[in-house]
Amino acid sequence: MLSLQIVIPTAGSRPGYLPATVGSVFRNATSPDLDLVVTVVGPPARMAEIRFQLQEFEGKVHFFKEAPGEVAGLAPGVNQAWAAESTDLITWIGDDDLLESGFMRAVRLLGSRPAIAGAYGQLNLIDSEDKVTRRLRPGRLGLWVSMYGPNLIPQPGSIYRRDAVSEVGWLREDLPYSMDLDLFLRLRTWKAGLRYVPALTGSFRVHDGSLTFANKVATSVEAAETRRSLTRGGIPLAEYLAAVVTRAYYLVNGLRDRGLVDRN
């Protein structure tokens, strides 16, 4: 089986969620060659606080301190952790999200299809108490819609081939909200591109402290600019069809808030 690295970037500000995130990785990323890295973003003093939060996983988790640079944030911490290792597959997950049971199905797909750049699956929306409020099923059309409409590809539970990411470029560190969409759209051009796995691979936690819900307008604006820079924007028919598919997607999944889709 291919070796796997999962990075959890954290500032230590979500102690109620971080241990659950780490636990979900160990439950559902059952690869014998798993490297789980918690990247500490922010002042060095936070390392001790985060180690204390995760003391039940002592000896199982690798800790990595983000090096100071021109840009601070999650993307630099993820990129630095990825660059420090050499596993076959890589991904990251938010410190308030969960990995789910279908994740290894995506891993096995990449193991059997060397030309696939990455894979994504279905996503649960959960609240602060872990209650599932929606199941999102982006399907094969999810990537196409994301080129012209809202981002339907779930980042939690997605997985990428290191060689593919290295070739198309690491996470853009100047995109605080749409770095995942930017990476997805670039990976679609690598060999066989991205593939959909019809299984639950991740959960996204909806709460007031998430980046998306604290910055809904900025998230939508940045996502739109990202699409225009990487796709043939301004195609009326494609944009119209994407809007139709998106509307159907909203109705099927019971969504009313676009912020639940253009998420980080």
Image: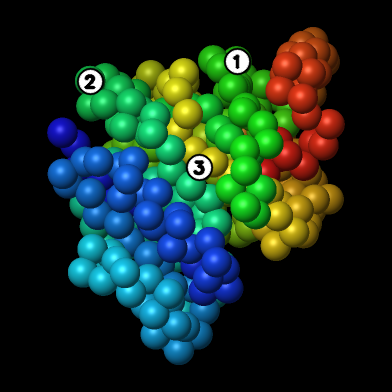
- Residue at 59 percent across and 22 percent down: it is 137
Neighbours of disc 2 within 10 Å: few (<14), some (14-19), many (20+): few
Of residue 199 and residue 176, the one placed in the foreground of this image is 199
Going from N to C along the chain, the mark reached first, 2 or 3, is: 2
Residue drawn 32% across the image and 45% down it:
27
Q: Give amino acid for label 1.
A: Leu
Residue holding disc 3: 156
- Amino acid type, label 3: Pro
Q: Are marks 1 and 2 in contact (CB under 8 Å)?
A: no
Q: Secondary structure at mark 3?
A: loop
Q: Quadrant of residue 2?
A: top left
What residue do we see at 30% from left, 57% from top?
A: 36
Placement of 144 over or under 29, stated as above or below: above
The residue beneath circle 1 is 141
What amino acid is labelled 2 in the image?
Ser
Display colour scheme:
rainbow
At label 3, counting other C-alpha atoms closer than 10 Å, the crowd grade (few under 14, some 14-19, many 20 or more) is many
Q: Residue 95, can we see it?
A: yes
According to the picture, the residue beneath numbered tag 2 turns out to be 112
Tell me if I can see residue 71 in this picture. no
